[in-house]
Image (cartoon, helix red, strand yellow):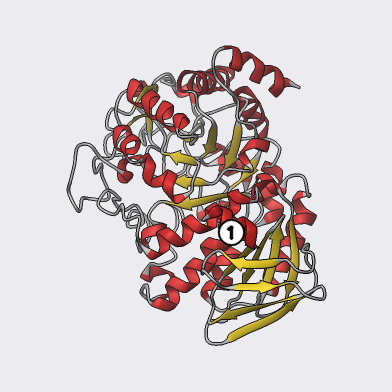
Amino acid sequence: MFNQILCIMMMISLHYCRTKEEWKNRTIYQLLTDRYASTKSNSTSCNLGNYCGGNFKGIEKNLDYIKNLGFDAIWISPIVQNYDGAYHGYAAKNIYQINEHFGTAQDLKDLVNACHQKDIWVMIDIVANHMGNQDLDFSRNYPFNSSSHFHDLCEISDTDFATHNLVNIERCRLFMLADLNQDNSYVANELINWIKWVVSEFNIDGIRIDTAMMVKGEFWKKFTEATGIYSIGEVFDGDMGFLKQFIGPMDGLLNYPLFFTLRDVFLHWGDMYRIESFYYNQLQTYGKNNIPYMAQFNDNHDNARFLSDEVNGVSASALKILQFKAFTAFTLTSIGVPIMYYGSEQLFTGGGDPKNREIMWNSFNENSDTYKFIKKINQARKAVNAGAQEQVQRYADNDFYAFTRGQLFAAFTSKYDRDVIRKITYHPYADGTKLCNVLFTGDCVLVQNGSFQVYLRNGEVKIFLPENIVVEME
């Protein structure tokens, strides 16, 4: 009820709330503002540890590239003024000023308006755990310029993360960044007032919350309710039992348990039954009603890219690209809000931070094979409103996994050296329905006597839709 009232109030002020229910139908293109597109630089390389020149105007001028790829939401970097060199946005200096390297407040408003005109929603990255200084000179921060606004000095250790020691995780410093004390009423109220201002002032549609495990859930609940829009929290951990406590204070979380499972299965020829097991455990842990708002992803700025040498010592060979396509296709079609990291469609291969934060602006190739592969999957997802449909497992064994989202049928294998053929008898299609693979023209099967056959050759992915829908798409 509170969120509904807040949304009504914001609509009166010309802001239209984007609820978690609406976000289920969106697909998100994650980009780093400093790395996606620039109106200031044409350089083919830069020092990835500092600013490279990407800005709001650059994003605005290249929105059609994202739109044509089939994405209808973007996730951009934190927007606030940062300490020197913090191109990524996670070292805030003044939360009421826009990062001058990215542009002006009007530039940001223009970007959001341009996105909305193209039916692209905007999610911004939010940092409310810390400020960017690593010393004890708090006077440089705004508005948190007193030692009373911060926790006492201590640093989170690897052991704290490994043992889920929330006492230290919530009060100590990450990378020695000044840790805000949300138990201080001034700090809590100012952060809540600030996020309400950001959402209203810039007409933002969603927020991604950085370092979510490092702040108490009671604060996040007040914080997210104050926005009235969809929120995704970052809890960099693969333990579903640990993550569960953060659902509720936030609408959804980055689905790291699924990310780790899929990455391992597809990269290392894993047992496809692990996916069935994952979904069973997720259902038991989170509950059916929470799963659609989790956010699955294929790569991001905090992990070495799937195609990097650092993943398993193998370069982006034809096999590895095939594996990555399977991983990406699963991410885009499975239940939850899909996120794809910029450059995936151009087969970027960057390793650990900052090598996985490459510049994009010389790589806008809409004719690349992977670009067209992803585009077709996004088109298929939208054609049948798959995001609003339940995910139903249709077949699972060691080598094969398939599910439906309404009329969309997706089939995968982790075996890349053999043909995998399965007869599907559990499905929603009537006899006589002709199903066609959206990824390969002319690859169709007929439903007869209550079944149809799926043939995956050497690790390929197939996304089937009824023929009439495929024709309409074309």
Q: Looking at the rendering, which quadrant does residue 237 occupy?
A: bottom right
Q: Is 39 in front, or is 209?
A: 39
Q: Residue at x 50, y 41 (%)?
A: 72
Q: Nearer the viewer, residue 354 or 199?
A: 199
Residue sitting nearer the eye, 430 or 261: 430
Which percent across, then down, holds residue 135?
35, 34
Residue at the farthest right position: 449
Q: Is residue 118 left or right of residue 381?
A: left
x and y percentages locating residue 424 in the rendered image: 75, 74
Q: Position of residue 31 (x, y in %)?
A: 40, 45
343 above or below 33?
Answer: below
Q: Which is nearer the eye, 239 or 120?
A: 120
Task: Give the mark count.
Answer: 1
Residue 94 appears in view: no
In the rendered view, would you say 22 is above or below 43? above
- Which SS class for mark 1? helix
Quarter of the image where one finds residue 394: bottom right
Q: In the orientation shown, which residue stands out farthest toward the bottom?
A: 418
Q: Which residue is mark 1?
A: 470
In the image, 191: left or right of 394?
left
Residue 246 lies, with reference to residue 12, above or below; the image says: below
Residue for point 20% across, 53% down: 45
Q: Residue at x 63, y 13 (%)?
A: 9
Judged left or right of residue 214, residue 86 is left
Q: Neighbour class for label 1 at 10 Å: few (<14), some, many (≥20)?
A: some
Name the quarter where the N terminus is drawn.
top right
Q: Amino acid at mark 1?
A: Val
- Is residue 209 visible in the rendered image? The answer is yes
